[in-house]
Amino acid sequence: MPGPDDALLVRGSPLGWWRSGVAEWHALADTTKVRAKVAVLVGATVVAFHYSLVSLIQTVGLDTPLAYVGLVPMLAALLAWINRSSRVPEPPVHDRQLDYILGVPMVVLTVVAGLVLPSRLGAMFWVNRIDLALLPVFATGATMLLFGVRVAWRQRVALAYLFLAWPWLYTAILLGTLGGFTSITLRGLDAVLRVVHVASPVGGSANAGLYVVSHQGHLFPVDVVTACSGVDGMVGFFLIGAALAAVVEGGLRRKLLWLCTGLVLLWVTNLLRLLGIFWVGAHVGERVAIGVLHPVAGLVMFALGVGIMASLLRPFGLRVRPRPVMPSTAASADAAPAVFVVAGLVIGAALVLSVANAGLTVFDPVAGASGEPKLASFLADPATPAGWTVAYQTEFESNKPLFGEDSRWFRYLYVPAAAARTSLRSTLPVTADVIDAGGLGGFDAYGVTACYSFHGYTLDDVADVGLGDGIVGQALSWRGGTSHQDWSIVYWIWPVETGSGTRFERVVLSLQNTAAGSVSLAPWTPGVAAPPGRSADPVTRRLAVNRAFLVAFARQIVAGQSSERDTGVFVDRLLAPGSGVQWAAGHPLRLAGSGPGAANGAPSTSSGAQSSTSSQASVAFWQAYFAHHPRVATGGR
């Protein structure tokens, strides 16, 4: 029984308030304690990763292979609720040192990584969605602190399931297989169309996936791309099926057989969806097929496939686990006696992470919620600062063994054109060397510094610089070399979206340091060290000024490239600028004069003897492509 001194202590000091709060906490029912800690855990996780979760949920329903990854947090919460009770006795443990030894480092590691890695990795942090890889680490550490290691182990399936929200796990596998998977879908669709005549494939490797549908003499093309191949439904079923397999009873082989059967069924339902769109287009019309049926057919067939597989659980020898009768609330409630301390630690870490997570919005112009790049290829269409023009110089092909056989290396030359329109004034050109490759391995192995050092240059200084939109580059100054020239350079690496998928480009801007030329910019570029004083030697001063000039130049390029949206160029097959017309001429179609609608890019619908279904659809496809990719067709800059 508390005495009068305790009452005075409660009213008179913070320690008294603390003891009173602890006493009230212990007086609560065990279920109330558990609910309070669950609220802290869920609230802290949502606050810490609010922008990451919102961006993930926004992917649900989009026409992308990862459309259903946004369901992972909700499915993980459902798994945690199902496993809320223990199936075996869990004795109360009062020595919680192991909880702190494991939980505290995981929470601290998440905070440090969330604060440091975005600035160190730049846009690649968002492209690889490392924030979503940190989410289950934080949730696991917070669970250990609030509930103890025993409860975290009981919830291991739900906590591990959160890793499935990490898009990198899918892109690392899917990027190399999407082309082959789409080919399988197209072969299956072609085989069915030989029996069910509701559409006709155009034919030819250049027109793979292009079909033409005829409705009352009107022809319209339908392009079956990767997003239509059924991979999104299969990924969605894998996520739901994996969660369902975790809560049903049955052998591992039976679960795997059920899961594989479901993946095949979802692929078949997607074929039925495509056939349904073709059939409606042929019998009702293009507007209903594409404008009405296409947006909802995928979701309907996905729900149908999942429902069928759920009804087949028992025939596969699987059954839902009965609810355990072994309560564990007492053990859970006593798992973290210093609940106010650990709750304060978790909430404080969540608030710090919340600020860092909100800062990830800077990457939005560069990459989408699933990490897919938004930028168009700089190699195919380089942005140009105001008052400057850019001209293609040459392509280097001898370095393909270093960066990959499908890599491209173009050199462009920027020259000032209208000094009155720009704050970047120079009497010297700026050289841009851009290497486009399918991976980052070559850039890691053959870096810029290694190249200059190999040619005898001496590094004068180096600094990391922010170039905008989350892009982090490096500014360097070099002296000497075999040609006895001094250079200032700024380079960065960014992901780009192309017709053949995600690729990576290293852009190197270089400016020669010579007394014969001069550069100026106003005001002095923020984020770059101020130029050395007049006491410095002229070479050092010119190197610093040139480097600051290049940083400002690079920032205008990054800002300009963010507005480029031509992401359909096949960089690995692109001819040098200026030869796009010859490239187009290699296709078996007429780009001009193909019919009365050629002037505005519309396909000819003439039913004369010389116009076949295949050629009309081919013309429609390529005219639409070049209408949206004029610079590719003409090589214009």
Image (tube, rainbow, N blue to C red):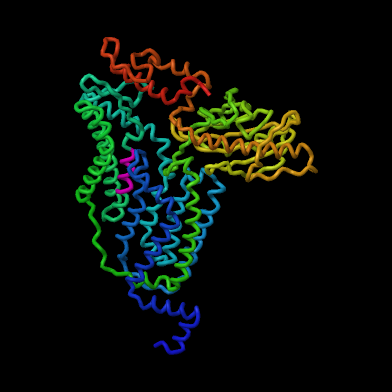
What residue is drawn where x is 39% and y is 48%? 56
Quadrant (top left, top right, bottom left, bottom right) of the N terminus: bottom left
401 falls in the magenta region: no
Residue 221 located left or right of residue 385 = left
Residue reaching furthest to the front: 420
Q: Residue furthest bottom?
A: 4
607 relative to 533, above or below: above
Check residue 236 for magenta coloring: yes
The percent position of residue 611, horizontal first and vertical second, equals 29, 13
Residue 37 lies left or right of residue 485; in this view the side is left
Chain part drawn in magenta: 231-240
Q: Is residue 54 left or right of residue 440?
A: left
Q: Is residue 103 left or right of residue 234?
A: right
- Front one among 621 and 546: 546
Numbered disc total: 0
- The residue closer to the viewer here, 506 or 49, is 49
**Percent of width and height locating residue 530:** 70, 45
Identify the residue shown where x is 23% and y is 52%: 318
The relative height of residue 240 versus residue 197 in the rendered view (above or below) is below
The picture quadrant where one finds residue 606 is top left
Pinpoint residue 371: horizontal percent, then vertical percent: 44, 42
Residue positioned 32% across, 34% down in the render: 228
Whether residue 405 is visible, yes or no, is: no
Whole-percent x, y for residue 563 in the image: 49, 35
Q: Quadrant of residue 525?
A: top right
Q: Main secondary structure of the magenta part?
A: helix
Note whether 372 is above or below 610 in the view shown.
Answer: below
State the residue lying farthest toward the top: 609
For residue 22, say whether it is visible.
Answer: yes
